Amino acid sequence: MRGPWHAVIFAPMAYILALDQGTTSSRAILFDRGGQVVAVAQQEFRQIFPHSGWVEHDALEIWRTQLAMAQGVLAKAGVSATDIAAIGITNQRETTVLWDRKTGEPVANAIVWQDRRTAQRCDALRSAGHLATIQQKTGLVLDAYFSGTKLQWLLDEVPGVRARAEKGELAFGTIDSWLVWNLTGGQRHITDASNASRTLLFNIHTLRWDPQLLALFDIPASLLPEVVPCSGALAQTAPELFGTAITIGGMAGDQQAATFGQACFSPGMAKNTYGTGCFMLMNTGPVAIASRHKLLSTVAWVGPGVRAEPAQACYALEGSVFVGGAAVQWLRDGLGIIDSAEQVQALAAQVPDTQDLYLVPAFAGLGTPHWDGYARGAMVGITRGTTRAHLARAALESIALQSADVFAAMTADSGIALRELRVDGGASRNDLLMQMQADFSGVPVVRPKVTETTALGAAYLAGLATGFWGGADELAEQWQMDRRFEPAMGDAERLAKRSRWRQAVRRAKGWVNH
């Protein structure tokens, strides 16, 4: 599918409710017909680090905070459930939840996408010669980032869990599945195709769970949710949650949703989202491109079809940076050199450069294009003259430099000289970072007026399913530029900077013994 689809059902309600369940917070955002934000509710939740390289969430806390934000944003805006045309859901993707079908209780904490505990399982599968099959079927590299080995770990390491799974007592899902299960009172166990494509268990060409992959990871098929399109009448909320049932009309992983929210509807259009990590996606249309530069090929979205045609998938190339905004969080929470993330720009701007200081924030390994689960963070070039300001600037540069590496790989894979990069996410509001991104990538960086594009994409998917919006053209017209950042760095300086960065990265790689 080369563009989104035409809507088929008329809906008179005034708003779309988007649930944006991220890595560090649960958010709910209310959008009007113009795609403008009416109200926002947000609550952070705990990050759990039981061991080095392990990252967990309490899935029940995620559900409680997400429900509270959904109810809270309606109250904040003075809106009732009868004013809501549909709910769109977007979520942190590869994070893995396993729960009891009868009680709804998780069997353990959710294992977060950043978690590295299964790196050795991935090594074993690679050594056994399974890499090519996995990549061909899933479009993914074999890495602990994805859900397959996380689910396998829960089955093998939590006492009694595999036996319960084999009896059909348990359900697996990424966070979208977990939210829908709870929103529907346990009536619907579903996931959408974009989230399914991040599990290592889903064939992106057939758009089905793959029996060979399930056997390879030793995953009982009974655990798996039904795979549904990203847009459609997917489920109804339990009436008691909001006072009346509301249609769940859209579901997509956060990065796919952001791509949709940025109106990247044509092949060759690309966006970068600056959240906890950074994720760059380029629309490749109906073709799943096999990457030569360690990018991922993933399902962007699957729609209900264009007019009477059957549903088709739109694909994307993706590059994943594990630590983006999390580097700034580390400055705040780990080092205490800033009190809030918003302070980092002013602190970094106190110095004109880093004085050759480089921070490689490989706190959870390195993603694209390295895929090194054994890399760890490194700071190179410290002198007696290094200050908090230099470190703050190096942290911002690390975000832009990692993304520039992804951008270069994407250009090489696609054969398309990308003319601009659309940006969104919390850190995209940092003007200094965006200028760095334009300088290091060598193309203009374009920030839209509405930077809540992840939630907006989920809203768009839900709104198209219910007739709230009429189609792709209407959505594309809503996209408006806030600011354009032009590259101000010369080619020679850019090449020297990125060469020095690569030197620093090499020092961080393979640090953990394995």
Image: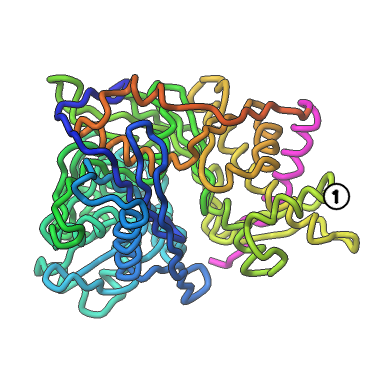
Front residue of 466/410: it is: 466
Q: Residue at image x 28%, y 71%?
A: 156
Q: Which residue is mark 1?
A: 355
- Magenta extent: 490-514
Above or below, comparing residue 93 to residue 469 in the picture: below
Relative to 127, is 272 on the left or the right? right
Residue 419 makes an appearance in the image: yes
Q: Is residue 508 magenta?
A: yes
Q: Residue at image x 45%, y 38%?
A: 318
Above or below, comparing residue 21 to residue 296 in the picture: below
Q: How many numbered circles does the render carry? A: 1
Question: Element type at marker 1?
Answer: loop
Q: Residue at image x 38%, y 39%?
A: 456
Q: Is residue 35 magenta?
A: no
Amino acid on which the number 1 mark rests in the picture: Gln
Above or below, comparing residue 428 to residue 126 in the picture: above
Residue 358 image point, x, y percent:
75, 52
Relative to 377, is 7 on the left or the right? left
Residue 127 makes an appearance in the image: no
Residue 272 image point, x, y percent:
52, 38
Relative to 59, is 86 on the left or the right? left
